[in-house]
Image (cartoon, helix red, strand yellow):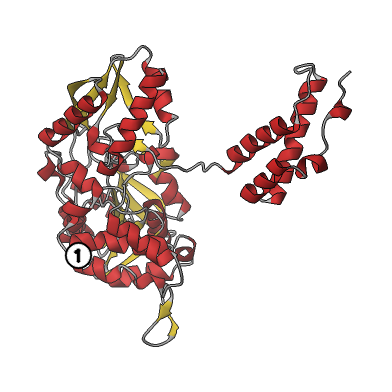
């Protein structure tokens, strides 16, 4: 009669060739933990009657191998984005240019002069990196980089608006992804909100009255992830800035998406640019690095030197500072703009500039390779809280399958995972967001799913 005494001990298993191979791959401590956990599961299943025969050494170690593999499998993995959403927040927003990736890789492989002055041989400041590029590119007096735009807004308000009344339009008290709310961030910084206007209408006189009521500065938060349409009114930014300066207060502009190019050139609505904010006289501008700018995650702060200097000295600046990889990457991305090569090198801008004819050709090539599907018209979007409601024409690979949801699940199980979408019981894939170097993997993944489906 089989009893738990027949189960091999941990030590017996460790003496086998298979265990030696596991130790070589995973290390002894982790392998030992996995063997113990595997044996515990077998004992529990045997005691509960789920199994009546105890597995042999090879099967136990095979189960241990599977357990170890699941433990070390990365949770953060590259995927193929076939959704047509360019700045897909859930999929990591902007893919990076080759030069940006090289810069981040190079500076991460060894030591760097992150905070070291090579000329003087003394400690330097990480805050200088990317600053001169931003000055040349935008004309700003000063600049600094932090780890994301939410940090940038929090830092700016903490440094410049603590215990001060900050005037902001009610139409701009937005909530973006993850429950991030502008009013909450303002309160966290110690600023006191002074709301003006209504949800759909704010007039210049509302700002004027708020300034007379003790407003110490004005903040604009660009409502990048929604639109208020029809019965609306908002004063021009320059008029707000001029009014503020006449009253001796300054203006902060949380621009969000960080456009340096006019998006209207791609057939989209105009997205306010960084240069336009500075031209309007805004004193401090904050924006993201990984949205329309097309770089790594970062928060970029530019503006008046005296105000930026004060921001740099605030204690919170150390808590939200950017690391060496971010600084190298954002510098490389900004250089594309400075060298007038951004549309050729930055994936986000390349995706936005694809013509329907180019995309149609890619879908036709996919259909020939797969001998499956049909080509249909569709729409791509920018995403990432940029240009809400805007889209541009595209062509899609449309697949008719028995169960679209199961098909999508199988696609996500491929290596690399493929993320697509469905509409009207069809599986749809948009070439606009599939990187050219990923096309081979996409087609292999699709063939695998068709073969197994």
Residue 422 image-quadrant placement: top left
Helix, strand or loop status at disc 1: helix
Residue drawn 15% across the image and 45% down it: 263
Q: Is residue 263 above or below residue 109?
A: above
**Count of picture labels:** 1
Which residue in the rendered view is the most extreme toward the top? 402
Residue identified by numbered label 1: 137
**How would you rate the neighbour count of disc 1 (Cα within 10 Å): few for under 14, some for 14-19, many for 20 or more?**
some
| Towards the viewer: 372 or 205 | 372
- In the rendering, at what x and y percent does residue 436 appear? 25, 42
Residue drawn 39% across the image and 27% down it: 411
**Residue 256 in sight in this render:** yes
Task: Decide if residue 14 is on the left or right side of residue 452.
Answer: right
- In the rendering, at what x and y percent does residue 112 appear? 42, 73
Task: Decide if residue 11 is on the left or right side of residue 127.
Answer: right
Image quarter hosting the C terminus: top left
- In the rendering, at what x and y percent does residue 90 appear? 39, 38
Q: In this view, does 88 lie above or below 305?
A: above
Task: Decide if residue 24 is on the left or right side of residue 190.
Answer: right
- In the rendering, at what x and y percent does residue 447 appear? 34, 26
Residue drawn 32% across the image and 56% down it: 215
Q: Is residue 149 above or below residue 319?
A: above
Residue drawn 44% across the image and 63% down it: 323
Residue 165 image-quadrant placement: bottom left
| Towards the viewer: 201 or 89 | 89
Residue 81 image-quadrant placement: top left
């Amino acid at each position: 009669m089989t009893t738990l005494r027949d189960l091999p001990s941990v030590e017996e298993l460790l003496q086998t060739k298979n265990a030696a191979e596991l130790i070589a791959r995973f290390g002894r401590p982790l392998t030992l933990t996995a063997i113990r956990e595997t044996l515990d599961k077998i004992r529990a299943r045997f005691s509960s009657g789920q199994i009546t025969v105890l597995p042999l050494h090879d099967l136990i170690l095979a189960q241990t191998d599977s357990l170890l593999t699941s433990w070390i499998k990365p949770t953060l993995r590259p995927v193929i984005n076939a959704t047509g959403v360019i700045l897909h927040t859930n999929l990591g927003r902007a893919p990076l240019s080759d030069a940006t990736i090289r810069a981040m890789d190079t500076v991460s492989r060894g030591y760097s002069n992150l905070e070291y002055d090579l000329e003087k041989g003394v400690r330097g400041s990480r805050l200088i990196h990317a600053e001169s590029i931003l000055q040349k590119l935008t004309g700003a007096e000063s600049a600094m980089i932090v780890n994301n735009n939410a940090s940038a807004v929090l830092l700016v308000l903490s440094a410049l608006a603590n215990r001060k009344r900050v005037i902001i339009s009610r139409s701009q008290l937005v909530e973006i992804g993850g429950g991030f709310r502008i009013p909450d961030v303002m309160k966290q910084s110690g600023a006191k909100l002074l709301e003006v206007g209504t949800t759909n209408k704010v007039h210049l006189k509302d700002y004027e009255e708020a300034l007379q009521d003790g407003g110490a500065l004005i903040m604009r938060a660009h409502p990048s992830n929604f639109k208020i349409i029809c019965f609306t009114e908002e004063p021009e930014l320059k008029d707000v800035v001029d009014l503020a300066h006449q009253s001796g207060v300054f203006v902060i502009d949380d621009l969000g998406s960080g456009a340096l190019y006019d998006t209207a050139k791609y057939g989209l609505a105009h997205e306010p640019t960084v240069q336009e904010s500075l031209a309007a006289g805004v004193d401090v501008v904050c924006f993201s690095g990984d949205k329309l700018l097309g770089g790594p995650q970062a928060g970029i702060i530019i503006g008046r030197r005296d105000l930026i200097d004060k921001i740099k000295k605030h204690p919170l600046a150390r808590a939200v500072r950017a690391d060496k990889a971010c600084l190298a990457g954002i510098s490389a991305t900004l250089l594309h703009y400075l060298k007038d090569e951004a549309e050729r090198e930055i994936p986000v801008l390349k995706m936005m500039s694809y013509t329907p004819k180019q995309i149609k050709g890619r879908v036709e090539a996919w259909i020939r390779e797969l001998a499956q599907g049909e080509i249909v018209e569709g729409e791509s979007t920018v995403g990432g809280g940029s240009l809400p409601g805007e889209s541009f024409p595209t062509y899609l690979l449309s697949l008719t399958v028995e169960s679209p949801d199961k098909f999508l699940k199988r696609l996500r199980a491929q290596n690399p995972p493929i993320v697509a979408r469905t509409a009207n019981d069809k599986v749809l894939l948009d070439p606009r967001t599939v990187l050219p170097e990923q096309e081979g993997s996409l087609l292999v993944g699709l063939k695998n799913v068709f073969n197994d489906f």
